[in-house]
Image: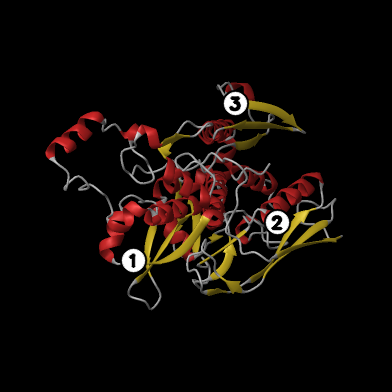
């Protein structure tokens, strides 16, 4: 199975430029770049690659404009002050499980964040950023930090761990088709393994192992052994080995009379394979386009209570606060959960939104997500490592008043837009 193309980490990026410090006309003449005035600043929208290029160009021109001034400052600045300046970028506290996954499975995306002018030191608890050249100050290091925070949060909100009872002979052929999943050992059980990855990847993995063709053999490559040579030859001659005629779910060649082509994205699968896949999640297994209302695996019987407080959130001082309390009681796992029949531990979670127009819009979208059982799931906690517990699904919530993005709190000026993008992927908008 070819590795599926996952959504871009940064589908759209916004940069604020001060027109007084650099002439925007010299750097903003790029196709696809959109600009609009936002107060005294210029708001620039575009793809990650375009905005990254604009940022570096703006930074370079600002450095050229102020080069003489900085040289004069450097001549009168002590080495201790320069050292202090290079340490001004605040470190990012990280979770060891999430960081381990990022380093092993997302190294390419991680490397895009760092520029030659910035060094990044990573351990399992903290990530720090330092400018390699103190003459450039901390602006590039700060930019790298902000990009890392956005990247880290995107991964953290999508990441799940699930346990399976599979031996090594079953597992290795399966994992060869899912290189984006990270393998770990089950706690205290020799026959149990834990897979960590994005929700979509884990769903595809489960559909793959549940396929009847996979229960008997990882790949049915010898299914014509008992047939006559003539029949085998006719079958081979009548079917092309082109990848477009191979079902990406079961990895077998498709028979046209039993093939289903999806209306929106035009991807084709075996009818039976697609039916089983849609029973789990009504999205295209190849590109993720949603067909119908998406239903999740959130345990039934939970509640979502809304209250209000006059205390404002940082960054939204003109507004009160919307307080969301989720209550999912203990229960027994169903067929859609990792260990059907086993008990799971429930959860009580609190989240916060600003009581502004956009905050109210997000609240209504979160209500819809909860009704469609998309907010939570049952699995392994990425923070405690405990199994069979109710965990967040891949919808980012602010669970703290303060602390900023790295502490899942405020201020975070782009959170409301970011969570709407996450919900839109699930067909909620």
Residue bearing mark 1: 166
In the figure, 232 relative to 177: above or below? above
- Mark 2 falls on what kind of element? loop
Task: Work out how far the residue at label 3 is from the one at label 1, CA to CA, in angstroms.
Answer: 49 Å
The residue carrying pointer 2 sits among few (fewer than 14), some (14 to 19) or many (20 or more) residues within 10 Å by Cα, namely: many
Mark 3, Cα crowd under 10 Å, few <14 / some 14-19 / many 20+, is some
Nearest to the eye among marks 1 and 2: give it: 1
Residue 195 image position (x, y, % from top left):
41, 61
Q: Earlier in the sequence, mark 2 or mark 3?
A: 3
Rendering colour mode: secondary structure
Q: Circle 1 sits in a helix, a strand or a loop, which is it? A: loop
Residue 342 seen from this side: yes
| Residue 33: image tag | 3
Residue 23 visible here: no
Mark before the other along the chain sequence, 1 or 2: 1
Residue tagged by mark 2?
A: 410
Most extreme residue toward the left is 229
In this view, the residue in front, 137 or 310, is 310
Percent across and percent down for residue 277 are 47, 48
Q: CA distance from mark 2 to mark 3?
A: 29 Å
Instruction: Give 304 or 86, whichever is nearer the viewer.
Output: 304
Is 427 located above or below residue 233 in the figure? Answer: below
In-image side of 153 versus 256 (left or right): right
Whichever of callouts 3 and 1 sits on the residue coming sooner in the sequence is 3
Front disc: 3 or 1:
1
Farthest right residue in view:
310
Check contact, mark 2 vs mark 3: CB within 8 A. Answer: no
Secondary structure of the residue carrying tag 3 is loop
Work out how far the residue at label 1 is from the one at label 2, CA to CA, in angstroms: 42 Å
User: Which percent across, then down, holds residue 168?
Assistant: 27, 65
Relative to 14, is 107 on the left or the right?
A: left
Q: Which is nearer the eye, 110 or 241?
A: 241
């Amino acid at each position: 199975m070819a590795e599926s193309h996952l959504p871009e980490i940064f589908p759209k990026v916004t940069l604020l430029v001060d027109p007084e410090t650099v002439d925007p006309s010299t750097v903003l003449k790029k196709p696809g770049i959109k600009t609009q005035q936002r107060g005294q600043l210029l708001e620039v929208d575009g793809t990650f690659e375009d905005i990254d290029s604009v940022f570096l160009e703006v930074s370079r021109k600002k450095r050229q404009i102020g080069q003489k001034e900085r040289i004069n400052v450097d001549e009168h600045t002590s080495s201790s002050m320069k050292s202090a300046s290079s340490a001004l970028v605040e470190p990012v506290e990280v979770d060891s499980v999430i960081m381990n996954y990022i380093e092993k499975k997302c190294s390419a995306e991680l490397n895009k964040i760092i520029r030659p002018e910035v060094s990044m030191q990573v351990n399992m608890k903290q990530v720090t950023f330092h400018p390699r050249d103190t003459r450039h100050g901390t602006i590039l290091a700060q930019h790298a930090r902000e990009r890392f925070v956005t990247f880290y949060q995107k991964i953290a909100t999508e990441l799940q761990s699930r346990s399976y009872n599979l031996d090594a002979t079953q597992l290795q052929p399966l994992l060869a088709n899912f290189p984006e999943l990270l393998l770990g050992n089950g706690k205290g059980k020799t026959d149990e393994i834990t897979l960590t990855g994005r929700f979509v990847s884990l769903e595809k993995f489960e559909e793959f192992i549940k396929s009847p063709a996979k229960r008997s053999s990882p790949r049915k490559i010898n299914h014509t052994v008992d047939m006559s040579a003539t029949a085998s030859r006719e079958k081979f001659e009548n079917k092309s080995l082109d990848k477009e005629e191979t079902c990406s779910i079961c990895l077998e060649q498709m028979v046209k009379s039993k093939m289903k082509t999806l209306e929106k994205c035009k991807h084709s699968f075996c009818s039976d394979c697609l039916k089983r896949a849609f029973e789990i999640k009504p999205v295209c297994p190849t590109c993720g386009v949603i067909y119908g209302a998406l239903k999740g695996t959130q345990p039934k019987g939970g509640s979502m209570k809304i209250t209000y407080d006059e205390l404002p959130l940082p960054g939204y001082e003109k507004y009160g606060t919307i307080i969301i309390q989720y209550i999912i009681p203990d229960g027994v796992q169903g067929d859609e959960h990792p260990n059907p029949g086993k008990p799971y531990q429930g959860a009580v979670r609190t989240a916060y939104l600003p009581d502004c127009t956009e905050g109210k819009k997000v609240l209504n979208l979160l209500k819809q997500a909860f009704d469609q059982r998309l907010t939570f799931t049952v699995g392994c906690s990425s923070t405690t490592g405990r199994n069979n517990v109710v965990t967040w699904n891949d919808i980012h919530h602010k669970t703290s008043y303060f602390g900023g993005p790295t502490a899942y709190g405020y201020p975070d000026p782009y959170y409301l837009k970011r969570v709407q993008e996450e919900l839109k992927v699930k067909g909620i908008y």
